[in-house]
């Protein structure tokens, strides 16, 4: 049974340490089957509160739906994806993650769920991600129906990436690479 309730964003950002990883596993429907202590601490939930809940319990309302659709479609096709994601803690605080989501398999090779490792995002990357996500979210909010808004924002995303001659993964890695290169020069 989902305990998802409306949480009002506080506008306050919370952080986890650069040497920490947030880890979770879900079944094929996105129901949490495992989370590590860093997840509990950062999201502000106990193990009992998270276990068996939909992973979208931490979905921030300012995160574009088209990004989640892209993420979900990719992992359902049994492919990995890297993404910048804004999450919502139980107390309303928000936190950014650089997520790596992969399909999980049992010992017989059967697809049984998903595994996600999240690390502290590159700050320089967020300087480029946040404006894009705001544009996508603004487009989604123009429509009365969620599907229409998501379709419109997906078009903006694909057009933007196409104009830059890249897909979302290339976009994400171009931000990471630029940041790594910038850091190595200092």
Image (cartoon, rainbow, N blue to C red):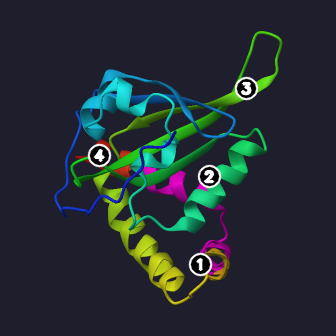
- Does 165 lie within the magenta span? yes
Q: Earlier in the sequence, mark 2 or mark 1?
A: 2
- Residue 1, position as x, y percentages in the image: 52, 39
Compute the Cα span from label 4 to label 3.
Answer: 39 Å
> Alpha-carbon neighbours of circle 2 within 10 Å: few (<14), some, or many (≥20)?
some
- Residue 78, position as x, y percentages in the image: 76, 38
The answer to whether mark 2 and mark 4 are in CB contact below 8 A is: no
Q: Secondary structure at mark 1?
A: helix
Q: Earlier in the sequence, mark 1 or mark 4?
A: 1
> Alpha-carbon neighbours of circle 3 within 10 Å: few (<14), some, or many (≥20)?
few
Note whether 186 is above or below 13 in the view shown: above
Q: Secondary structure at mark 4?
A: helix
Where on the picture, by quarter, is residue 3?
top left
Kindly report which numbered mark, 2 or 3, lies closer to the viewer in this rendering: 3
Note whether 12 is above or below 111 in the view shown: below
Left or right of residue 9, residue 72 in this image: right
State the residue in front, 80 or 175.
80
Compute the Cα span from label 2 to label 3.
Answer: 17 Å
To which residue does mark 1 refer? 153
As drawn, the label of residue 183 is 4
* Residue at 48% over, 83% down: 141
Q: What is the chief secondary structure element of the magenta stretch?
A: helix
Q: Earlier in the sequence, mark 2 or mark 4?
A: 2
Residue found farthest to the top: 107
To which residue does mark 3 refer? 112
- Does 174 lie within the magenta span? yes
Q: Earlier in the sequence, mark 4 or mark 3?
A: 3
> Alpha-carbon neighbours of circle 1 within 10 Å: few (<14), some, or many (≥20)?
many
- Residue 132, position as x, y percentages in the image: 45, 73
* Residue at 45% over, 28% down: 51
To which residue does mark 2 refer? 71
Compute the Cα span from label 2 to label 4.
Answer: 28 Å
């Amino acid at each position: 049974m989902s305990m998802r309730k409306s949480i009002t964003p506080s506008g306050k950002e919370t952080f986890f340490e650069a040497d920490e990883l947030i880890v979770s596993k879900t079944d094929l429907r996105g129901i949490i089957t495992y989370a590590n202590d860093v997840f509990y601490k950062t999201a502000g939930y106990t193990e009992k509160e998270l276990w068996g809940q939909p992973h979208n319990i931490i979905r921030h309302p300012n995160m574009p739906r088209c990004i989640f659709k892209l993420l979900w479609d990719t992992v359902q096709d049994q492919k990995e994806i890297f993404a910048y994601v804004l999450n919502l803690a139980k107390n309303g605080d928000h936190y950014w993650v650089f997520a790596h989501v992969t399909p999980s398999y049992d010992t017989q090779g059967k697809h049984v769920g998903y595994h996600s490792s999240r690390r502290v995002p590159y700050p320089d990357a967020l300087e480029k991600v946040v404006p894009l996500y705001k544009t996508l979210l603004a487009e989604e909010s123009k429509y009365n129906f969620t599907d229409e808004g998501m379709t419109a924002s997906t078009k903006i995303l694909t057009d933007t990436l196409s104009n830059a001659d890249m897909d979302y993964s290339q976009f994400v890695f171009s931000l990471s690479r630029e940041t790594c290169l910038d850091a190595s020069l200092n």
